[in-house]
Amino acid sequence: MAVRPVGPDDADRVRRLLERSSPESIYRRFFTLFPSPPARVVRRLTDVDHADHEGLAVLDGDEIVALASWDRPRHAAAEAEIAVLVDDAWQHMGLGRALVRMLSGDAARHGIAVLNATVLSDNHPARQLAVRVGQPTSVVLDGPEAFYTFSLAS
């Protein structure tokens, strides 16, 4: 297994990860379903600039089995949104937790002081992950969504 930044050359690997993912995993990550991975979603996940958008991939051989990213909504903002997708066969093995920890350090090095995570309220594994990787400074439950805020150590 290897962890490395994701890039445009990973488009086919990301597409295959999305195709292997169950409808439940897709819905939990994207809050919607799609019959096949839309090109714009694959492009968004692989077109990282390493300044306002970063992504890390876990590879097993040549296949991506987990993907996590942070996105800064406004250039030079001190906040970013973090999201994770782990291949169904690799869930509950610590990959998501490891990626979140790595991305948190990377985000802090890019001047991000706050990470936000939006999770479906009934996505218990993601909600457990959110409290295991760090102490949220804020948790807001709003209907079908839970909003977590994490302050990064400076």
Image (spheres, grey):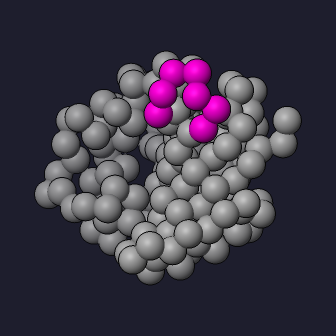
* Most foreground residue, 21 or 80: 80
* Location of residue 90 in the rendering, given as x and y in whole percent from the top left corner: 53, 63
State left or right for residue 99 relative to residue 132: left
Any magenta on residue 154? no
Q: Residue at horizontal 39%, vertical 36%?
A: 45
Q: Quadrant location of residue 153?
A: top right
- Using the rendered view, name the quadrant where residue 78 is placed: top right
> Main structural element of the magenta stretch: helix, strand or loop?
loop
In the displayed structure, 106 sits above or below 38; it is above
At x 38% / y 75%, what residue is drawn?
A: 144
Please give the name of the residue rendered at 53% of the width and 45% of the height, measured from the top-left corner.
81
In this picture, is 112 found above or below 30?
above
- Of 67 and 142, the residue lying toward us: 142
How many marks are shown on the rendered structure? Answer: 0
Q: Position of residue 28 (x, y in %)?
A: 39, 66
Highlighted range, magenta? 73-79
Q: Is residue 71 visible?
A: yes
Q: Looking at the image, is 138 positioned above or below residue 1?
A: below
On-image quarter of the N terminus = top right
What residue is drawn where x is 85% and y is 35%? Answer: 154
Residue found at the very far left of the displayed protein: 35
